[in-house]
Image: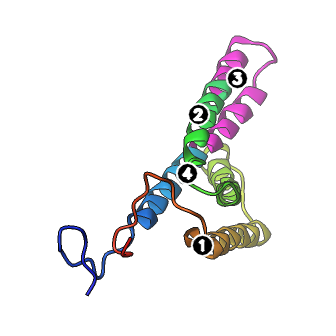
Amino acid sequence: MAVDAEGKSVQGKKPVRKDKRVVALLVLHIVLLVYSLTGIFGKMAAAEQFLSLPFLGYYAGVIILLGIYALAWQQVIKHLPLTTAFANKAVTVLWGMLWGILLFGETMNIWKIAGAVLVVAGVVLFVIADDPGKTEPDADDELVGEGL
């Protein structure tokens, strides 16, 4: 039976690294939600007269959200492989569809839905195939329950 440094059983415990990965993926999707909001502000700006006060307000919203997104993205990619982070960006298609339906009265058809299902399936397969065990842990990442 495996024990930790204090002599306590570690069987059945998952490595801390995997828990951190789940949290990083959750944070990534929150960041991508923020990114998707830029589409709403952009669409609203497009409906206004160019350089009018409402146009500039919506455009300022786009710039602010992109700034928040850029800062958060830098933090997320510290904890995930870049390929995983970029593959997950595809879910913004789903957010765009949702915003289009809820806010702009856009309609969906079977082909758009099928495309969205393919996008989600691709992201899920990519994340499942990405084996974080093949990368070396950071110095501050301690693997619990692995006998290290």
Marks 3 and 1 in Cβ contact (< 8 Å): no
Separation of residues labelled 2 and 4 (CA atoms): 12 Å
Separation of residues labelled 1 and 4 (CA atoms): 17 Å
Tell me the quarter of the picture where residue 41 sits. Answer: top right
Residue stretch rendered in magenta on the structure: 33-61
Find out whether residue 45 is within the magenta segment.
yes
Q: Quadrant of the C terminus?
A: bottom left
- Which mark sits nearer the N-terminus, 2 or 4? 4
Q: Which labelled disc corresponds to residue 131?
A: 1
The amino acid at mark 2 is Leu
**Residue that badge 2 annotates:** 71
| Of the two numbered discs 1 and 4 in the rendering, the one whose residue sits closer to the viewer | 1
The amino acid at mark 1 is Asp
**Residue that badge 4 annotates:** 28
- For the point 72% across and 32% down, which residue is it? 42
| Of the two numbered discs 3 and 2 in the rendering, the one whose residue sits closer to the viewer | 2
- For the point 70% across and 39% down, which residue is it? 39
